Image (spheres, rainbow, N blue to C red):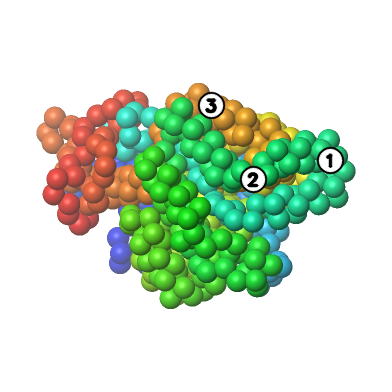
Amino acid sequence: MIKLPSQSSGVTAAERFALDMLVDLSRLVPAPSGVEAAQVELTTGDRPRDLRGWAAAGWGIEVTDGVVRVPRAVLHTVIDIAGAADEQRATARDRYSRVPSSENPLVRAGLEREPIVQRAALALQAAARRAAGRRPFRTVAAWPDGRRWAAAFTHDLDVVAWWPAFTLLRAAELGRKGAFGRLARAAAAALGSLGRDPVTLGVAGVLDAEAHARVKSTWFILCGTPTLQTMRAGDLTYLPESPKAKGIVARVAAAGHEIALHGSFATLENQDAFAEQRVRLERLAGVSVRGVRQHYVRIHPGVTERAMAAAGFEYDATLGFPDRNGFRLGVADVVPRWDAVEDGPLGVDEVPFAWMDRALSKYRGIEDPMAWCSDALELAAAARAVGGLWTGLWHPNLTPALGYPDAPAAYAATIAGVLAEAPFVAPLATIVEWRRARRAVWARAVAADGRVEARSSSPTPFPLRLEDAEGRLAEPVDTRSPTGR
């Protein structure tokens, strides 16, 4: 458990947000002033360090009996990275109006494949354990069912109609790379698919692989009206109300997977476009749409999320890299979003993806699907090491007929490799609901026998439990009577 600085102690809004994020990622249980627990104090005057310097210095965290001292400079670093404040200040844009990866502080430091902010949170947890001494110490169990980490499988439905056009574009890409063997195999598969529907077959293949593994995933669906202009831009290419698209959405929903919005280019800073597409998708799918991910990972950090929140979305899943794989926010987990302009929290959570198939084939020139699988498992191991969440993005149109020989088998191998390490697996909306409930846990009292009474002010689909200083399951968390902290 941990006691945080009071609101009257001169902590800025940004520092409070960063500290709350570290406490959340550390799984420490906040305690009010009347409960005996170690106290966090913020320090000033620490000399500036780069990311590697802070990590080597244990994030500058100091421990004395009952006190954990955290440098304010570390909190500012957390806001810059995990709050994306650094990217919000960036003015550079690529041809899709995205903040280039080169503007990300982790990329500049060569640390984008490490959940480095989460490692800072674990350092805070270890410091709080030492500072507690004989005082009661509790953390919240990381994930449901006693799981120590989590994984989520997601899909962007970019292609439904006009599949031969996408095959020709892919053929040109393979030709430019000199991958003539793959090109010949893809051409043979495409010719064999004439008169058939390889897109729907690709979706069915993904659903079958996930059904075999008992995985429930999240599917992001484009829901605008295509025009010649949107097609040429690679944005909207299918009508969601078309029989083929409706059939895919119905099949995905019937299998128990989550339906979410794939925001078109028009939504970039437009809450009305977000709201219109969300309502349209809900009408089409017959379910509540709680999440969104931007097409082409096209987002203006801090601005786009404000429009998402205004349109009623609970979470965004955009903030991964388009051109490489890794942890764009330095976390493998669900975190709240920060508005660096308004100096306050945004109303959505972020579920950043760590791995995407096309980041390798399109941007890195890696055409071997099994190499994509190896990359996915490497990042999953990094997420597992911090007790976090690995989120992967697989496009269901990656099939032989559309130019990707061997890709379906690689996706099946990716699923098997991730599941071999026993993560908690669920659709993103379920994971966000769990994390909000875990984030809302607080210690209400400590009984005379040392038992801790804890509550959560947020509903949860799974029971919450505390863990003791040795990591053993301890008291249950009361979620029956939500109450403010």
Q: What's the residue at 78%, 45% (across, down)?
A: 365
From the image, which quarter does the N terminus lie in? Answer: top left
Please state which amino acid type lies under the numbered disc 2.
Answer: Gly
Camera-side mark, 1 or 3:
1
**In front of the other: 317 or 378:** 317
The secondary element bearing badge 2 is classed as loop
- The mark that comes first in sequence, 2 or 1, is 1
> How far across and how far down the image is residue 278, in percent?
41, 64
Q: Which residue of the protein is positioned furthest toward the front in this rendering?
A: 195
Is 176 left or right of 106, judged from the image as shown?
A: right
Q: Quadrant of residue 413?
A: top right
- The mark that comes first in sequence, 1 or 3, is 1
Camera-side mark, 2 or 1:
2
- The mark that comes first in sequence, 3 or 2, is 2
Please state which amino acid type lies under the numbered disc 3.
Answer: Ala
The secondary element bearing badge 3 is classed as helix
* Residue indicated by mark 3: 416
* Residue indicated by mark 2: 195
Q: Is residue 241 visible?
A: yes
Residue 384 versus residue 74 in the image, above or below: above
Is 56 left or right of 39, judged from the image as shown?
A: right
Residue contact at pointers 3 and 2, CB within 8 angstroms: no
Q: Gap between marks 1 and 3, in whole Å?
A: 28 Å
Q: What's the residue at 57%, 41% (across, down)?
A: 202
Q: Is residue 423 visible?
A: no
* Residue indicated by mark 1: 179
> How far across and how far down the image is residue 262, in percent?
50, 59
Q: What's the residue at 78%, 48% (across, down)?
A: 171
Residue contact at pointers 2 and 1, CB within 8 angstroms: no
Q: Gap between marks 2 and 1, in whole Å?
A: 26 Å
User: Label 3: how many residues lie within 10 Å, few (<14), some (14-19) or many (20+)?
Assistant: some
